[in-house]
Image: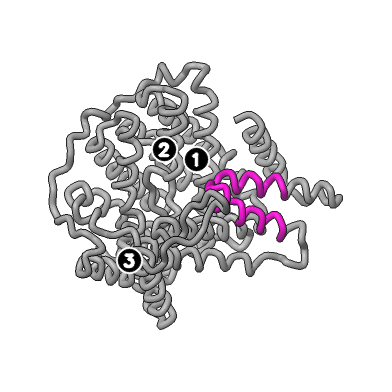
Amino acid sequence: MSAMRSSVLERFQMAQQGTTAQREVQAGLVTFMAMAYIVVVNPSLLSQTGMDYGAVFVATCLAAALGSLAMGWLANYPVALAPGMGQNAFFTFAVVLGEGHRFETALGAVFISGVIFIVLSVLPLRAWLINAIPRSLKLGIAAGIGLFIGFISLRNAAIVVDDPATLVTSGTLLSAGPMMAILGFALIVALAARGLAAAVLLGMLAMTVLGWLTGTAEFKGVLALPPDPTPLLFALDIQGALSLSMLTTILTLLLVDVFDTAGTLVAVAERSGIVRADGSLPRLRAALLADSSATALGALLGTSSTTSFIESGAGVAAGGRTGLTAITTGLLFLACLFLAPLAQSVPPFATAAALLFVACLMARGLADLPWDDLTEAAPAVVTALAMPLFFSVADGIGIGFIVYALVKLISGRAGEAPAAVWLIAGIFGLKFAFL
């Protein structure tokens, strides 16, 4: 037993990261609880295209499990994967329902984009792009993802609702959902302020149990056999996806996944303290390969693009620092195949409380910006603001790079912008103009 423990500690470099196996497993559980909603939301969205709900459920669990296991083992990152929010909405409402493509063709496009991701991950180009991002933009991306998470959490808890005049407004704050979310958030903050490493997990569990006891959340049971996955297994139409009409779809999937992944990896790595002194990310190629392979595999299983999840920040906040956190989350997604009723028993207000806490932690990156140099600080702030307002990590990154390049150019300091900045700004300029 001691030999196995030593092997685990050495494999995941826990001593160097100042963590323990117990803390990593606990963090993996927190990440899973923050992500568990995807096993309900993803099938609900994709089934609107005619895809079998049960088969999407299985594909979602398997894609999340295998992607997270690969990320943890290959890259030793505390980052879990699952079919991405935003990507599944694009798949459903733009590609299938909007443009009229069959879901089989859309799955083929996801697979092709995944293969392109893999090629880029093997080549040094993608790692070069991400490592060349200026530190100020990295801080803006991390803070922006935090604000995006915060906006999602407030919306999921109905604390923020839509309004035809002002776009958004406050919800009915004295109703059960918002009140429980606010109470859960306050509990998590109080526990964290007392130095409790499991603050996020305990806060979520407390609000879930309170929801069951008060009738504001439904306990749906524990065990159930997995649904039949065969209706979607290898159902993709690659030949149909190679048509000219699908070119912009594939390009959009490529851009969104590349920069969503970049933003998430940068943000989580920054928060977990694994970024090198020069601002680069260690083992980045392995992380990118795990992420891109998960997209291709997910398409074969029957789901939209699989990507690194920003909710991994919840596990990092709970102390996760190594790949054992992601592996724990992956194993829990496998178990979720048989524990679907229990996973669905965690109410949205409990998850919202945890995500709002994570948002507060991630937004503090703005404090580290070089405020005495506005050509660095201002584009980072624009990046952070754009993500929640655009409701897109990728588009927020894009506008941030464009602003950064323009500011440097107009201020006569164009040489300070790396070549990657000009390349990424140009790509997004073309995307905003033609896609």
Label 1 SS: helix
> What residue sits right under mark 1 in the picture?
257
Which of the two labelled residues, at mark 2 and mark 1, occupies the earlier sequence position? 1
Q: Position of residue 16 (x, y in %)?
A: 45, 68
User: Majority secondary structure of the magenta segment?
Assistant: helix
Q: Residue at x 61, y 56 (%)?
A: 385
User: Can you say whether 312 is above or below 63 in the image?
Assistant: below
Q: Which residues are magenta?
A: 377-403
Q: Amino acid at mark 1?
A: Asp
> What residue sits right under mark 3 in the picture?
176
> What residue sits right under mark 2 in the picture?
305
User: Can you say whether 311 is above or below 243 in the image?
Assistant: below
Q: From where the camera sits, is residue 386 visible?
A: yes
Q: Is there CB contact under 8 Å for labels 1 and 3? A: no
Q: Quadrant of the C terminus?
A: top right
> Is residue 355 toward the left or the right of residue 136 in the image?
left
Which of the two labelled residues, at mark 2 and mark 3, occupies the earlier sequence position? 3
Quadrant of res 429: top right
Label 3 SS: helix
Quadrant of res 195: bottom left
